[in-house]
C-alpha cells in the first residue's frame, strides 16, 4: 500500500514505470476478462470448499472451540498437549498411521506398478480384463466391499477365513478377527492394499503405453541386459509424470484412510484403539467430543504430514516443479 | 524386428510361468467381487449355512425384494434414498464436467495474470483430502445455509482439482491451429468452447465422469455431515448404516448383501463403458 502512495505522488509530472505497469495490468485483466469468467465457478467453489476450510482449520487449531460458545485463542496449547499429553494420539494414532501408511503407501504403489507392468506385458486382447479385475475393488469402494470383509472375517465359524483355517487345521478355535486388537490393524492393511489399485494404477497403465518402444531397442544396444534394468533405466524415467501423479494419489488416499476401520468394526472408535488412525482421532475429537479446536490441530498436523510426504515424492521424481 | 522380439518374449517358459501365476493372482483378487454377486442372490438360509458356501446354490431375488419392501415400512423409504442419490449424482456429474472443463480450457490455452498461481494451487491441492478438514467444511456449509439441501451435496464436489488437473493435461494437447481456424471463422470464446473444446475432450470428460461418479455415488461424508434430515441422505449412507450394525446382527445380512451389489453395479457399468477412454486420457494427465 505504502509504495503505491509514493508512486502516485511521483506521477504528477510524468507517469512512472509503476503506473504504466499498473495500467497495463488492468488492461490485461480487461482483455482476459473472459478467462476469469470461465474460471470463476471453479475458483469460487475451490476457495469456499478447499482454501477457506484449510485456512479455517489452521486458525481453529490455535483456539479452544466447542462449536457453540465463543472461541478464544490459546496459542500453541493444542499442539503442545497433542505432543505431550495425548496418550491415545502418541501411542495409538501416530504409530498406527505410521505403520499403516508405510505399508499401504509404498506397498500399494509398488504393487500398482508391478501389476500395471505385468498387465502391459500381456497381449492387447486380454489386457482390459486384467485391468478390470485389479481395478474393480477400488471401484466398488468401501461401502460395497464391507459386505465382503464382514462375511470373510466374521468371528464365528461361519466366517470364511475362520472356516478355511479351521479346516486346514491351522487354528484350533475361531478367531474374532475384527474385534481382536491384535489383528485389526493387519486386516485393515490387507484390505486397503486390496483396494489400492485406483486412479494411480490407471495412470501407470496409461503411462506404460507412452514409453517409446525404440528406447528399449537403443537400451539393448547400450548394454541393458535384463528386464529389471530395462524397467529402471528406461520405463520408469519415461513415464515420470504418471509415476508422480500416481504417487500423489496414493499418498492422499493413504493418509485420509480412516473410514475403513469404522466400516470393518462398525464402531467409530475401534476396540482398544487398535485401528485408530490420525483421521479417526480427528473425527473422535470433532464429532464425538466436540472439541473442534483440538481436532483442527490434529488435522493441521495431518495436512502438514501429507505436504512433506508430497514434497518428498516430488524430490524423488526430480520434477522441475517445486512446491 | 520389434514384432519378432515380442513374439520371442511371449513364448519363453519364464513368461508362461509368469502369466499363469499372474492369472492366478488376478483370480484371487477378483474373489470379493465374485462374492458380492453371489452373496446378493443367496436365500436367507444359504447366508448362514455351515459350512459357509462361496457360490450361490439357489439364486433368488428375495433379498432385493426385502430391501425394497423394508423400504415402504421404514420412516424414510428406500426409494427416497435412491432418488436422492440419482438426483445428486446426475446434477454433480453435469456440473463438474461443465465447471471443470471451462476452467481447464482457459488454463490450458490462454495466458493471463495469476495463471501460474492458480495452477500451482491446483497442483498443491491434489494432495488435499476433504476428510482432513471436515470440521471447517461443516462450518462453512452451515454458515452459508446449505445443510439439508441438494446443493450441500453437489457444490463441495465442484471443487475438484483432480478433474481440472487432468483436463488441463488433455486440453493442452488439442492443437492451437484448430482454435485459430475457428476464430477466423468467427467463433467467439464461448463458441470455441462449446463447439470445439467440449467435443474434442470427450475422452477426458468420460474419465472425470467416472471418477466423479465413483466418488459421489459411494460418498457418505456429505450425508453424514451436512444433512441432518434423514430424507436428504443418499443411498450410500443408507447402505452404510445397514452395514454398520452388521457385525453382530443377523437380521440385516440379506438386505446388506443386496444393497452392496446395488452400490457396486452402476460403477461397474460406467467403467466398462468408458475403460478405453480412461486410459486414453491418463496418458496426458501426468504431473510434468
Image: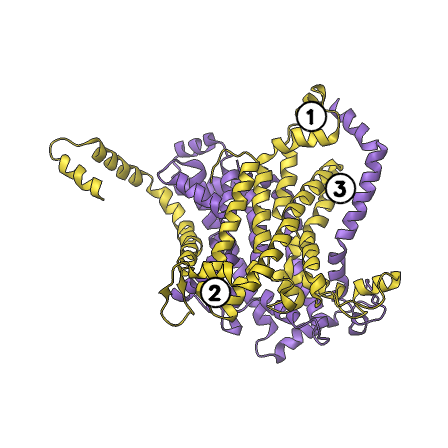
| For discs 1 and 3, the disc positioned in front in the rendered view | 1
Identified at 48% across, 39% down, the residue is B196
The chain in yellow: A
Q: Which residue is mark 2?
A: B150
Identified at 71% across, 66% down, the residue is A180
The chain identifier of the residue carrying mark 2 reads B
Q: Are the residues tagged 1 and 3 within 8 Å (C-beta)?
A: no
Display colour for chain B = purple
Q: Badge 2: few (under 14), some or many (20 or more) residues near its Cα, within 10 Å?
A: some
- x and y, in percent, of residue B7 in the image: 80, 29
Q: Earlier in the sequence, mark 1 or mark 3?
A: 3
- x and y, in percent, of residue A19 in the image: 21, 35
Judged left or right of residue B271, residue B134 is left
Residue B151 appears in view: no
Q: Which residue is mark 1?
A: A216
Cα gap from disc 1 to disc 2, whole angstroms: 53 Å
Q: Quadrant of the N terminus of chain B?
A: top right
Q: Which residue is mark 3?
A: A126
The chain identifier of the residue carrying mark 1 reads A
Amino acid at each position: 500500500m505504502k509504495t503505491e502512495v509514493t508512486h502516485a505522488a511521483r506521477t504528477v509530472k510524468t507517469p512512472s514505470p509503476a503506473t504504466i505497469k499498473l495500467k497495463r495490468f488492468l488492461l490485461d485483466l480487461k482483455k482476459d476478462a473472459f478467462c476469469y469468467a470461465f474460471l470463476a465457478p471453479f475458483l469460487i467453489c475451490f476457495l469456499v470448499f478447499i482454501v477457506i476450510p484449510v485456512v479455517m482449520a489452521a486458525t481453529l487449531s490455535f483456539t479452544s472451540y466447542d462449536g457453540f460458545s465463543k472461541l478464544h485463542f490459546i496459542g500453541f496449547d493444542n499442539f503442545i498437549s497433542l505432543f505431550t499429553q495425548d496418550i491415545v494420539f502418541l501411542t495409538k494414532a501416530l504409530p498406527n498411521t505410521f505403520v499403516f501408511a508405510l505399508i499401504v503407501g509404498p506397498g500399494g504403489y509398488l504393487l500398482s506398478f508391478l501389476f500395471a507392468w505385468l498387465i502391459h506385458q500381456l497381449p492387447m486382447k486380454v489386457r482390459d480384463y486384467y485391468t478390470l479385475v485389479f481395478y474393480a475393488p477400488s471401484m466398488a469402494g468401501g461401502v460395497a466391499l464391507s459386505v465382503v470383509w464382514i462375511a470373510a472375517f466374521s468371528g464365528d465359524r461361519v466366517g470364511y477365513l475362520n472356516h478355511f483355517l479351521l479346516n486346514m487345521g491351522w487354528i484350533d478355535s475361531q478367531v474374532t478377527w475384527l474385534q481382536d486388537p491384535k489383528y485389526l490393524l493387519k486386516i485393515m492393511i490387507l484390505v486397503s492394499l486390496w483396494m489400492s489399485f485406483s486412479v494411480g494404477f490407471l495412470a501407470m497403465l496409461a503411462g506404460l503405453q507412452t514409453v517409446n518402444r525404440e528406447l528399449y531397442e537403443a537400451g539393448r544396444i547400450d548394454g541393458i541386459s535384463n528386464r529389471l534394468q530395462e524397467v529402471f533405466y528406461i520405463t520408469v524415467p519415461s513415464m515420470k509424470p504418471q509415476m508422480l501423479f500416481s504417487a500423489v494419489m496414493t499418498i492422499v488416499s493413504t493418509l485420509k484412510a480412516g473410514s475403513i476401520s469404522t466400516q470393518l468394526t462398525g464402531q467409530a472408535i475401534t476396540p482398544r484403539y487398535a485401528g485408530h488412525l490420525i483421521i479417526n482421532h480427528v473425527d473422535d475429537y470433532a464429532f464425538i467430543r466436540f472439541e473442534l479446536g483440538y481436532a483442527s490441530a490434529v488435522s493441521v498436523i495431518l495436512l502438514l504430514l501429507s505436504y512433506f510426504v508430497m514434497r518428498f515424492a516430488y524430490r524423488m521424481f526430480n520434477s522441475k516443479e517445486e512446491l | 524386428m520389434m514384432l519378432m522380439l515380442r513374439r520371442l518374449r511371449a513364448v519363453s517358459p519364464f513368461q508362461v510361468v509368469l502369466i499363469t501365476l499372474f492369472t492366478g493372482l488376478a483370480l484371487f483378487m477378483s474373489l470379493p467381487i465374485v462374492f458380492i454377486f453371489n452373496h446378493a442372490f443367496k436365500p436367507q438360509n444359504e447366508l448362514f449355512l455351515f459350512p459357509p458356501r462361496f457360490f450361490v446354490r439357489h439364486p433368488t431375488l428375495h433379498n432385493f425384494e426385502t430391501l425394497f419392501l423394508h423400504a415402504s415400512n421404514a420412516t424414510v423409504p428406500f426409494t427416497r434414498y435412491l432418488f436422492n442419490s440419482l438426483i445428486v449424482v446426475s446434477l454433480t456429474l453435469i456440473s463438474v464436467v461443465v465447471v471443470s472443463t471451462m476452467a481447464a480450457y482457459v488454463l490450458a490455452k490462454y495466458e493471463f495474470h495469476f495463471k501460474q498461481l492458480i495452477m500451482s494451487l491446483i497442483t498443491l491441492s491434489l494432495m488435499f483430502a476433504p476428510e482432513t478438514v471436515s470440521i471447517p467444511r461443516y462450518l462453512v456449509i452451515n454458515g452459508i445455509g446449505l445443510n439439508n439441501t441438494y446443493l450441500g451435496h453437489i457444490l463441495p464436489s465442484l471443487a475438484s482439482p483432480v478433474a481440472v488437473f487432468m483436463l488441463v493435461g488433455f486440453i493442452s494437447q488439442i492443437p492451437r491451429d484448430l482454435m485459430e481456424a475457428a476464430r477466423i471463422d468467427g467463433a467467439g470464446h464461448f463458441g470455441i468452447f462449446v463447439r470445439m473444446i467440449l467435443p474434442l475432450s470427450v475422452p477426458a470428460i468420460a474419465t472425470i465422469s467416472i471418477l466423479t461418479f465413483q466418488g459421489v455415488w459411494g460418498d457418505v461424508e456429505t450425508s453424514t455431515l451436512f444433512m441432518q434430515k434423514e430424507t436428504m441422505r443418499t443411498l450410500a449412507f443408507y447402505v452404510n448404516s445397514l452395514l454398520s450394525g452388521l457385525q453382530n446382527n443377523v437380521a440385516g445380512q440379506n438386505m446388506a448383501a443386496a444393497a452392496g451389489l446395488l452400490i457396486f453395479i452402476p460403477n461397474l457399468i460406467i467403467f466398462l463403458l468408458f475403460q478405453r477412454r480412461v486410459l486414453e486420457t491418463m496418458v496426458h494427465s501426468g504431473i510434468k
